[in-house]
Amino acid sequence: MEQEEDWDRDLLLDPAWEKQQRKTFTAWCNSHLRKAGTQIENIEEDFRSGLKLMLLLEVISGERLPRPDKGKMRFHKIANVNKALDFIASKGVKLVSIGAEEIVDGNLKMTLGMIWTIILRFAIQDISVEETSAKEGLLLWCQRKTAPYRNVNVQNFHTSWKDGLALCALIHRHRPDLIDYAKLRKDDPIGNLNTAFEVAEKYLDIPKMLDAEDIVNTPKPDEKAVMTYVSCFYHAFAGAEQAETAANRICKVLAVNQENEKLMEEYEKLASELLEWIRRTVPWLENRTGEPSKNTMQRKLEDFRDYRRLHKPPRVQEKCQLEINFNTLQTKLRLSHRPAFMPSEGKLVSDIANAWRGLEQAEKGYEDWLLSEIRRLERLQHLAEKFQQKASLHEAWTRGKEEMLSQRDYESASLQEVRALLRRHEAFESDLAAHQDRVEHVAALAQELNELDYHEAASVNSRCQAICDQWDNLGTLTQKRRDALERMEKLLETIDQLQLEFARRVAPFNNWLDGAVEDLQDVWLVHSVEETQSLVTAHEQFKATLPEADQERGAILGIQGEIQKICQTYGLRPSSTNPYIALSPQDINTKWDTVRKLVPSRDQTLQEELTRQQVNERLRRQFAAQANAVGPWIQGKVEEVRRLAAGMAGSLEEQMVGLRQQEQNIINYKGNIDQLEGDHQLLQENLVFDNKHTVYSMEHIRVGWEQLLTSIARTINEVENQILTRDAKGLSQEQLNEFRASFNHFDRKRNGMMEPDDFRACLISMGYDLVSVPQGEVEFARIMTMVDPNAAGVVTFQAFIDFMTRETAETDTAEQVVASFKILAGDKNYITPEELRQELPAEQAEYCIHRMVPYKGAGAPAGALDYVAFSSALYGESDL
């Protein structure tokens, strides 16, 4: 009210002020209206319709006024002016003696009063310097900025500006490149003022609002005109300072965001490569298609060894590094109040862990299957060789037997010859019965080969069937011939008892010789020294029976000698063959010589096998000795790392040094693992798959070693994240030690995680009111959502530190970033690419331009960008 009365009185007292205000206010209005593509020529005429007045208010406030009336009648104009005046009143401004009718009627005094009210409200009122505002704040700002300059003493907004030096000082203070202040003279006020007006209009975008002659020739220049013009300098320079501050804040925020995006891209790439490798590897490990050859399966086992020793270890390190990168990224996002990183679908850490578990499951089953297949093929090969050997022996024995049994030689034979044929046939039946076990053994071998899925089972079955069919036919023919001979026996009575005795004794001895030859040529399959020693013992027992067998051979040959002696004594024509058996003494001697030759050969073969098994036993003991040392060492280190993680002492850097030393010790121990891998490979190359001297298999050692590497890496990453948290939160080592002591006190299980009840007790001990009902329950539930967002049911030490420091941390927020962009945009709700390139470094300006969405509000130029939506997206907020 007082300001308006002073203004009325000033206008009446000095018409020169009216002229200055008219020029200044017109220029001030046009500096804003040109943003909307228009201007005014006559201040009292061009505002009469109310349209440009409403447009002016919209430009300087950035707000929408009610839709103006389109008519040209007086009441339409009054209505539009009233809408403008109502808007001014809504901003807390009391209009005194100013009505719509006076503005519509072109009352210059009232129009100038209204414009001054607008200038005061929107250009001067918000100026604040050291708890002073509006006019006093603007005056204090001018005094501070011009204090160092000679011949300048700003005490008011009229006479202090007449010589122009104050205006030139303001410009030089902020833009020394535009004015050479040292060359200015106090006795040239017109020149000084015109210099200030021209530089401000050309370089600072401040239109010329005053005339130098009017200022100099007026004893007391108009205060409002001068104040209006000077306020433009405040907004120009203060806005630049704010823009610089805002630009720095935005650069900082964008740098953090760019670094996080790079980490996200690296995580996505590494996760994709690891998952793709697992995807390619699992089908190979799940393929259980067997091979008919043991050598082929052995090559598969070699490929699997290469996979475990060469291909998988780098992937184990990649998986561990992936988890470390993910935890580090989440820590950085959490510390900068960014939303948590959510990887692409199927690339979560849990997805990778699930895929890895599937890989290890397939891997374990694959190794068991390979070993089982090799054993099966080894046994198949052994059984097939044994089948071929016994089938060949049987086929050799049966060769010509069917033709012999089909002969009718007894029809023309003498009684002695018939008796001989009958006894011979009895001997054959005895021999046939002795071969029954061999036929059954051949059939049993064929059945076992079928059960083990031998790849040439069809050929084996065909040969076995032929042997069985022939055996049945031999039985039928044998029975028919016996019946015929027994009928002839009733007619023939003479028989040579000695020949019969020879035949009776030589047949079983011959079978014994055949069995001995077969046993001495038999192949074996053993896996230990004990089994080999058992074969050696059995062979020694066999050799012990040779003297007795030699005596039996002598007795049999003696019978033949007695026959020859009787024939010589009684002058009988000796028969060239024994009528009862086809075997001759020469046959017995030949087979006996064969047995004698095979015995030393068998000795040598068994001794070689015993030597090989002894070598295998040494390899078992060598592996077991190393494994029994490595296994407990790994278990002890795993427990030691777990204890370190649960109860660390000293500064984080000291903890890191200790952990790095542990890590180096573990790395230095890698040579023992490699040595053990070499011993394990020697065992497998010798087809040794069992070891009774140790409970540690190579698989146990590998799993333990991988667990140890992962454990130490995770513990180091946890300390690194604590260092990041400490540095970001500004914590001291004493605060961290206090946090660790509180956490360990309530971590009852000593596993680095507190359960909810323990966490509640910890908070109560620190002064949190969680006992009252129901407020305490509600508050605790709220806190749990912060420290355990995934509802895992535990609170980690990292989450505990984040909670204890979150409320006192000073970090950028989405609202602060929006406010900074608003400064750069000149209080507009949008920003242009040109403004971003002008205010920000090139790289970060282009970063914003490519990520900001187009501004959809009305009144914005083409290409305008929405910085509010961009700021919200930075912090994961859908609506500020």
Image: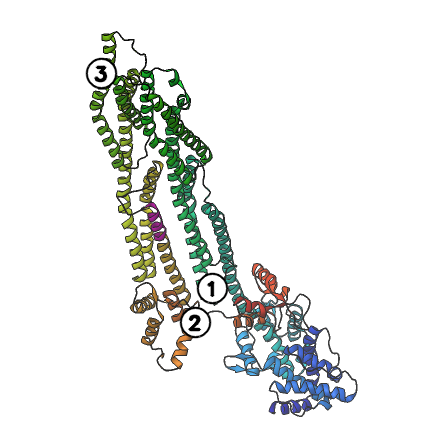
| Residue at the disc numbered 2 | 785
Q: Which amino acid type is marked by label 3?
A: Gly
Q: Would residue 743 be found to the left or right of residue 36 on screen?
A: left
Dot 3, how many residues are within 10 Å of its Cα: few (below 14), some (14-19), or many (20+)? some
Q: Tell me which residue sits at (33%, 48%) in the image.
A: 701
In the rendered view of the protein, which quadrant contains the C terminus? bottom right
Element carrying mark 1: helix
| Residue at the disc numbered 3 | 558
Element carrying mark 3: helix
Q: Tell me which residue sits at (76%, 82%) in the image.
A: 70
- For this rendering, which residue is in front, 826 or 625? 625
Between label 1 and label 2, give the one nearer the viewer.
2
- For this rendering, which residue is in front, 303 or 513? 513
**Residue 649: where, in percent of width, then height?**
29, 62
Q: Which residues are magenta?
A: 694-708
Label the magenta part by its dominant secondary structure.
helix
| Label drawn at residue 445 | none
In the rendered view of the protein, which quadrant contains the N terminus? bottom right
CA distance separating discs 1 and 2: 17 Å
**Residue 469: where, in percent of width, then height?**
43, 31
| Residue at the disc numbered 1 | 333
CA distance separating discs 1 and 3: 106 Å
- For this rendering, which residue is in front, 820 or 358? 358
Q: Would residue 296 be found to the left or right of residue 237 on screen?
A: left
Q: Is residue 261 magenta?
A: no
